Image: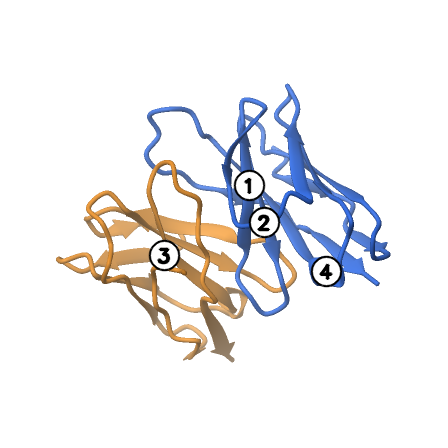
Chain colours: A orange, B blue
Amino acid sequence: DAKTTQPNSMESNEEEPVHLPCNHSTISGTDYIHWYRQLPSQGPEYVIHGLTSNVNNRMASLAIAEDRKSSTLILHRATLRDAAVYYCILHNYGQNFVFGPGTRLSVLP
Amino acid sequence: DAGVTQSPTHLIKTRGQQVTLRCSPKSGHDTVSWYQQALGQGPQFIFQYYEEEERQRGNFPDRFSGHQFPNYSSELNVNALLLGDSALYLCASSLGGRGIISYEQYFGPGTRLTVT
């Protein structure tokens, strides 16, 4: 019962930007939008999170729609190391993280 | 700064046996969550420990139990193992005190459990 919808898979070319979409039409006003990624044979890794405003960090940018019903994770220049499963998660204090199946990103050299 | 560590890395058990998995959180973190990840699926939340008590629990049977020690490390115990318990078990640590609205979780590499 994940509250987000993501494409099963996406492909990108190395050194090109990647836009990973996430729909969350039932988001509540206090839900944070989290992104994690899981590289092969590793545990998930925090990427970024936000509430209303767009967010940037050293790994990626998070663009949040004005109505907050969707968001996009932006990798500015994909590298082979970015090939992973990317999870979009809604989270609120007192709740546990609910992971869906995520988007499997392939990066082509 | 050591991140989240888990032991053992791999484990093979027989149906009906019991298993204990261990987790040491990232330095400074006081909250530990456990997840089960079946092949090809996202992690599923088992439970979370804070201040040595189970604070939240997912949809897992009582065969799954845990413990948190005063140094914040944690154990996951599974009794009466079933073939379906074969999975990657992940531990995640975070800061979970009151007043924190949302937080980053740091995951360990996991323990791969195979039940035969």
In this picture, is A19 found above or below A69?
below
Q: Amino acid at mark 4?
A: Ser
Task: Report the residue marked by disc 2.
Answer: B60
Residue at screen point 67% across, 56% down: B88
Quadrant of the drawing holding the C terminus of chain B: bottom right
Q: Amino acid at mark 3?
A: Ala
Task: Report the residue marked by disc 4.
Answer: B86
Query: Label 2 crowding class (10 Å Cα cut-off): few <14, some 14-19, many 20+?
Result: few
| Towards the viewer: B14 or A16 | B14
Query: Label 4 crowding class (10 Å Cα cut-off): few <14, some 14-19, many 20+?
Result: many
Letter of the chain that mark 3 sits on in the rendering? A
Q: Amino acid at mark 1?
A: Phe
Q: Secondary structure at mark 2?
A: loop
Task: Report the residue marked by disc 3.
Answer: A60
As drawn, the label of residue B47 is 1
Is residue A29 among what the camera can see?
A: yes
Contact, CB < 8 Å: mark 1 with mark 2? yes
Q: Secondary structure at mark 1?
A: strand
Query: Label 1 crowding class (10 Å Cα cut-off): few <14, some 14-19, many 20+?
Result: many
